[in-house]
């Protein structure tokens, strides 16, 4: 992921070179392959290059062409199609960088150019003719774009720390986002960051900034994708397979080793297989990681872990295995700055990033996004039938579930109850059941200060809403923000390690396919809710893996629980008698110590300490911001 940033003094004052240098230096800590500044009066654009695609080695950014200056972090996937429509330099295509495609597209289509681009991109063009900055973020929001805006100043970057390097950017935190994180350990928002004055440009959006105006527009909406209708089921399967193979292939444009997640499921596994086969044709091997710890002693050998091993052997994939240490997890609570490097999704991924960096790879393929869209389980089908008073279809579905999934009538009844009873009642009952059966130790206001506890009690939290319709549920999952939170968190955390993530199942063409086909394609078929994806990958994976039902995660969850307890013991030992002063407006450190002293890990539910651990993270992250 290349670093991009810029400064636009909207008051017309020339940019202070020291400020521009400070921003560039903050972005250069990861040793970019090349870094440059372009400045002219009130505007400065900067770039820290990460070579990844073969063409990127021929690029020198910011790119200036006549009255246009471009800085970008981008990979353009429809280069062949664009070549036929754009005026490009008279050089071999292998020497023409993606920046030249973007600038040529802007020259031809102006502010409509994002509609013609396919890939992952965040770019900014300064148009000298009309004195404006044109900012763009890709359709799904894979590439990052943060900005600070006031009447006098506009600062942008894909790295929050670069924006904070500008001495006029406020570092005040957003209380609502902090409260949300302390409660939910995530920030499911498409616009806001932890910093009150630093925002995100939403996916599929453009932002035009001049001295006197700021105009934001959407250039693509998932709700308006065209409908897709084929005559036979097989045509959908064939089309999805073509899209999948192409989505993987365009993400293999790199001069460095390629890494993929390989969980053993039907999202990451076919991606890894397609990548491995295509790389083998050019005498390269794929490296793959499974998050599951290597089983030791009498530990349960999780099905997906053994599946990934089998696939690796079958496809000559270099299967990377590791066992995450509780000490490593405990250390991350202090080392990771989630305010600027993203909330932490899966501790294993931070081990993966370190190992990927060590082998010299710069790309990680991930199956993230499949469950929400193209490999959706159709779990809301029954509710959809009942909501629309199609009782016969609902009854038929119930019998399918019982017959093919070998469910008991009690299990079927529970499924029906969950649909009929309002979700708030179910949540209350689940909370009551946990208190009765899990021996949860009550923690009052947890570990926040009295003042901030009052704020948290009045703050309204964004809740995920179950909707009784497959298509509406896909839209809720797409817009809710958890997709974006993980993408942005992994992007920010991988930035200093010279790594970028690529998500084939969030390829725009696959997303449009997923949302364009009839919702009936997601309805359960003979008890299977992901049959479209399973049929698509059937020729890529061993049949027992392709058609494996949803695994029972009870045993693997118990292993994770034991590891978490071991981590918490390290934290207890470290913080109970620590004399440091960690007070701030959010966290009551004495209360943290008191909770850790009295909490019996072997007796109570260890996950009830999550709020304490998150508060510890906040303490250390704030300290890191103070040192920037």
Image (tube, helix red, strand yellow):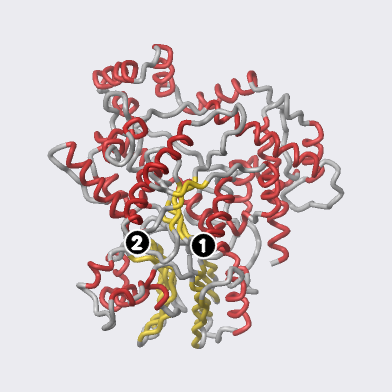
Q: Residue at x 34, y 54 (%)?
A: 248
Label 2 packing within 10 angstroms: few (<14), some (14-19), many (20+): many
Residue 414 is situated, as x and y percent measured from the top left of the image, at 44, 17
Figure quadrant of the C terminus: bottom right
Can residue 481 be spotted in the picture?
no
Label 1: state its secondary structure.
loop
Residue 466 is situated, as x and y percent measured from the top left of the image, at 42, 34
Residue 468 is situated, as x and y percent measured from the top left of the image, at 35, 31
Distance of mark 1 from mark 2, alpha carbons? Answer: 23 Å
Of the numbered discs 1 and 2, the one sitting upstream in the chain is 2
> Comparing marks 1 and 2, which lies closer to the viewer?
1
Residue 343 is situated, as x and y percent measured from the top left of the image, at 58, 50
Q: Quadrant of residue 551?
A: top left
The residue closer to the viewer here, 448 or 82, is 82
Q: Which mark is residue 360?
A: 1
Label 1 packing within 10 angstroms: few (<14), some (14-19), many (20+): some
Q: Residue at x 76, y 53 (%)?
A: 584
């Amino acid at each position: 992921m290349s670093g991009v940033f810029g400064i636009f003094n909207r008051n017309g004052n020339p940019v202070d070179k020291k400020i521009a240098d400070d921003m560039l230096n903050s972005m250069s800590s990861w040793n970019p392959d090349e870094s440059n500044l372009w400045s002219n009066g009130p505007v400065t654009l900067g770039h820290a290059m990460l070579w990844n695609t073969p063409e990127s080695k021929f690029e020198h950014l910011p790119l200036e062409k006549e009255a246009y200056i471009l800085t970008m972090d981008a990979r353009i996937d429809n280069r062949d199609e664009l070549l036929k429509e754009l005026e490009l330099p008279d050089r071999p295509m292998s020497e023409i960088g993606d920046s030249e495609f973007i600038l040529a597209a802007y020259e031809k289509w102006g502010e409509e150019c994002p509609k013609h681009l396919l890939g992952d991109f965040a770019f900014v063009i300064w148009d000298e003719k009309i004195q404006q900055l044109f900012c763009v973020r890709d359709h799904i929001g894979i590439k990052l774009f943060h900005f600070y805006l006031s009447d006098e100043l506009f600062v942008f970057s894909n790295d929050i720390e670069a924006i904070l390097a500008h001495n006029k950017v406020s570092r005040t935190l957003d209380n609502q986002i902090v409260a949300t994180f302390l409660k939910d350990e995530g920030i499911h928002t498409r616009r806001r960051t932890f910093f009150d004055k630093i925002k995100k440009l939403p996916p599929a959006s453009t932002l035009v900034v001049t001295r006197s105006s700021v105009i934001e527009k959407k250039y693509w909406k998932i709700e308006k994708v065209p409908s897709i209708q084929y005559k036979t089921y097989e045509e959908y399967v064939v089309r999805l397979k073509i899209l999948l193979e192409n989505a993987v292939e365009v993400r293999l444009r790199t001069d460095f080793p390629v890494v993929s997640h390989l969980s053993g499921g039907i999202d990451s596994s076919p991606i890894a297989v397609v990548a491995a086969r295509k790389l083998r044709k050019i005498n390269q091997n794929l490296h793959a990681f499974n998050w599951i710890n290597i089983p030791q002693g009498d530990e349960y050998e999780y099905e997906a872990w053994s599946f990934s091993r089998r696939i690796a052997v079958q496809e000559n994939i270099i299967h990377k295995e590791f066992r995450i240490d509780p000490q490593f997890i405990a250390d991350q609570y202090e080392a990771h700055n989630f305010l600027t490097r993203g909330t932490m999704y899966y501790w294993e991924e931070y081990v993966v990033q370190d190992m990927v960096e060590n082998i010299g790879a710069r790309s990680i393929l991930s199956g993230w996004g499949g469950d929400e869209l193209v490999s959706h389980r159709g779990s809301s089908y029954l509710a959809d039938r009942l909501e629309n008073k199609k009782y016969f279809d609902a009854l038929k579905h119930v019998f399918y579930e019982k017959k093919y999934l070998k469910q008991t009538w009690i299990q079927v009844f529970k499924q029906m109850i969950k649909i009929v009873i309002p979700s708030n009642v179910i949540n209350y009952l689940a909370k009551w059941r946990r208190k009765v059966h899990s021996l949860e130790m009550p923690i009052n206001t947890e570990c926040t200060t009295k003042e901030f506890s009052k704020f948290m009690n009045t703050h309204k939290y964004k809740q995920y809403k179950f909707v009784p319709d497959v298509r509406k549920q896909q839209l809720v999952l797409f817009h809710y923000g958890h997709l974006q939170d993980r993408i942005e968190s992994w992007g920010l955390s991988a930035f200093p390690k010279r790594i970028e993530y690529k998500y084939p199942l969030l390829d725009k063409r696959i997303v449009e396919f997923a949302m364009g086909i009839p919702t009936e394609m997601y309805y359960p078929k003979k008890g299977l809710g992901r049959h479209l994806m399973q049929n698509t990958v059937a020729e890529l994976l061993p049949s027992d893996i392709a058609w494996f039902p949803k695994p029972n995660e009870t045993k693997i969850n118990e292993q994770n629980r034991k590891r978490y307890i071991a981590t918490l013991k390290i934290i207890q030992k470290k913080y109970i008698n620590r004399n440091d002063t960690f007070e701030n407006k959010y966290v009551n450190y004495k209360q943290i110590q008191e909770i850790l002293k009295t909490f019996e890990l072997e007796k109570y539910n260890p996950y009830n300490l999550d709020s304490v651990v998150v508060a510890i993270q906040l303490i250390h992250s704030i300290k890191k911001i103070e040192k920037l």
